Image: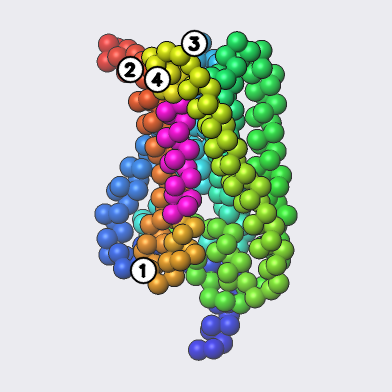
Amino acid sequence: MPAIATSNYNSSRFILTGFPGLEVDYLWLSIPFSSIYTMIFLGNCLVLHVIRTEPSLHEPMFYFLAMLALTDLCMGLSTMYTVLGILWGIIQEINLDACIAQSYFIHGLSFMESSVLLAMAFDRYIAICHPLRYSSILTNDKIIKIGVAILCRSTLLIPPVIIRLKFLNYCHPHILSHSFCLHQDLIRMACSDIRFNSIYGLALVISNLLLDAVLILVSYVMILHAVLAIASQEERIKSLQTCVSHICAVSVFYIPIIGLTMVHRFGKHLSPLVHVFMGNVYILFPPLMNPIIYSIKTQQIRRRVQRLFYLKEMC
């Protein structure tokens, strides 16, 4: 028995955790999860199609929305194979290289979404606080530079901590906490020195997610200050309404992160099912909700989508 255990610990394959205690219901669970992934794919593709084909939406605000939709689309696709693979009984394990690659995409896309939300907050700040300079500040050239900066920030800072996962010695049971791979899950199973991963990983979270959240909050304090200075109550409401979609998007991104962090930090006594559920909410909730939020709350998107479906019905 010890020999088998040692062999398992030294192997480069990791067991994915589905939904503990619900194994007999996997086929039924696959139906809502398949529907969620389908909605993520169709919803974000629809937003991208509408922005691409509607000339009136070729504005900074909607370019940033397109970046958000593309990020959400990739985030959904990054976990689809392992989550649905478990529910359909196709896979139960994942090798180290694939696990590291998936971890890179999940964390990179999470940082990218945070960066895009910060860029969108900057867009709202310029639109409300400096409306006369909006078009001169957010030119197409500036938007391209912001997009490249977001891409570099999200992809070039992570490799040092992700690549090192390849060279760690994993001597603890190779059982992941979720249906996908996360950096914190892998280092938990390592018996090598993980101080670099822990310190660098914390620095990444502080310099990306936490810093972005603080800057978004600061931008809205300044926006609120500018709105309250407007004499007309009608104009105040109109200005704030342009921020509703973004505030909702920020909420559906950061609330699951806070919830998952709290569960990991203080919920060690909770059922593993709670950890798995929160992990899936963190991954799937923002990509699912953002297209719905922007289709309902943003008038230009809503009208274009309605017109698109009306034309299809006419055909």
Image marks 3 and 4: residues in contact by CB distance under 8 Å = no
Q: Secondary structure at mark 4?
A: helix
70 or 26: which is nearer to us? 70
Residue depth check, mark 4 versus mark 1: number of the one nearer the observer? 4
Q: x and y percent of residue 163 in the render?
A: 70, 57
Give me the disc on residue 56: 3
Image marks 4 and 1: residues in contact by CB distance under 8 Å = no
162 or 252: which is nearer to us? 252
- Circle 2: is it few (<14), some (14-19), or many (20+) Cα within 10 Å? few
- Circle 1: is it few (<14), some (14-19), or many (20+) Cα within 10 Å? few
How far apart are the alpha carbons under marks 2 and 3?
A: 15 Å
How far apart are the alpha carbons under marks 3 and 4?
A: 23 Å
Judging by the rendered image, the residue that carries numbered circle 2 is: 306
Amino acid type of the residue tagged 2 in the rendering: Gln
Q: Secondary structure at mark 2?
A: helix
Amino acid type of the residue tagged 1 in the rendering: Ser
Residue depth check, mark 3 versus mark 4: number of the one nearer the observer? 4
How far apart are the alpha carbons under marks 1 and 2?
A: 43 Å
> Would residue 206 be found to the left or right of residue 281 on screen?
right
Give me the disc on residue 271: 1
Q: Residue at x 55, y 58 (%)?
A: 182
Does the rendering let one see residue 98? no
Relative to residue 121, is residue 136 depicted above or below?
above
Q: Secondary structure at mark 1?
A: loop
Q: Earlier in the sequence, mark 3 or mark 4?
A: 3
How far apart are the alpha carbons under marks 4 and 2?
A: 25 Å
Amino acid type of the residue tagged 4 in the rendering: Ile
- Which quadrant would residue 11 be assigned to in this image? bottom right
